[in-house]
Amino acid sequence: MAVILDGKAVAEKIKTELKAQVEGLKTNGIHPSLAVVVVGDDAASRVYVNGKIRDCAQVGIQSWEYALPAQTTQQELLALVKKLNVDDEVSGLLVQLPLPAHFDEKAIIDAIDPNKDVDAFHPVNVGKIMIGDYDFLPCTPAGVMALLDAYGIDVTGKECVVIGRSNIVGKPQAMLLLHRSATVTICHSRTKDLKEVARRADVLVVAIGKAEFVTGDMIKEGAVVIDVGMNRRADGKLVGDVNFAEAEKLAGYITPVPGGVGVMTRAMLMKNTVQAAKRSASRR
């Protein structure tokens, strides 16, 4: 039976450490803060934003939420981003994705000051991740690495397979594993013999966005299985991209859904916000 990688417990420990850091920063006149912009009434986005605001309160980070109607124009959103970019009281800034269909998401991301880009989506930050000289890491891949570290799982020389090639998870996840001297394969919808490739993995990271896509016959015995997915089945149950019941019988370690990678993602956002505040203070 696999060891469960308890993201909730690890995230709480990280947030406790961050809270102590924040208290220390405040005594030196540095006040970490996060501005969250959300457009429209997407139910999932609302859940995520509420969670981020709660985490800020727990860690001691000042937070502001800018909830804009779905009818907001591209120009209005860009104007708000520009305003927050130059607001010295704002350490970190994020625009919750996805945006309503009439927005050019790339243009919005590109408009965020890279020094405040705590999601690490801006091309400048993406490029820094590629070369391994970064200020911020995308929160989900960073959460995966922190979870591996917490359980003493060393990926050096290991065969790691990432299923999913998104800019938010798959690609940066592969780079972070590569920076740790893993041998990395990125798989996607057009990968031939996906099952065979997955079954080679010592560490399998699944971020494909399909409920219970990875089954037991795709998992090497003893592998570390990291499930980034978050899907709701027709019966209302929240599940990942991995069939947990099947995978648990074979894996050496496995993340649950919920309680695995998702809570780690939010903890990493808090870490990035604290880092942004420190960097902002050093530039003044």
Image: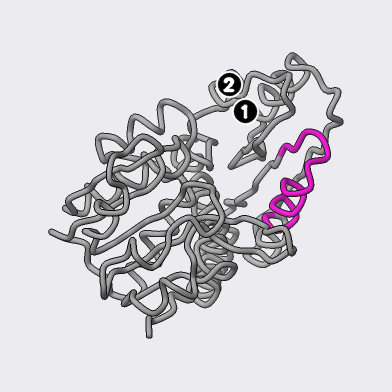
Residue at the limit of the structure toward the top, as seen here: 75
Residue 1: image quadrant is bottom left
- Mark on residue 95? none
Tell me the mark number nearer the camera, choosing from 2 and 1.
2
In the rendered structure, which amino acid carries the disc numbered 1?
A: Asn
Identify residue for label 1. 85
Q: Residues within 10 Å of mark 2 (few under 14, many from 20)?
A: some
Residue 245 in magenta? no
Give residue 104's position: percent from left, percent from top. Answer: 64, 18
232 is higher (above) or lower (below) than 79: below
| Residue 118, percent from left and from top | 53, 42
Is there any visible trace of residue 20 in the rendered image? no
Q: How many callouts does the rendering have?
A: 2
Q: Circle 1: is it few (<14), some (14-19), or many (20+) Cα within 10 Å?
A: many
Cα–Cα gap, marks 2 and 1: 9 Å
For the residues bearing labels 2 and 1, Cβ distance under 8 angstroms:
yes
Q: Which amino acid does label 2 sit on?
A: Ala
* Image point (47%, 49%), residue name: 275
Query: How far across and how far down the image is residue 194, in percent?
Result: 31, 47
Q: Is residue 275 above or below residue 102?
A: below
The colour scheme used to paint the residues is: one colour
The magenta region covers 37-52
Residue 111: mark in rendering: 2
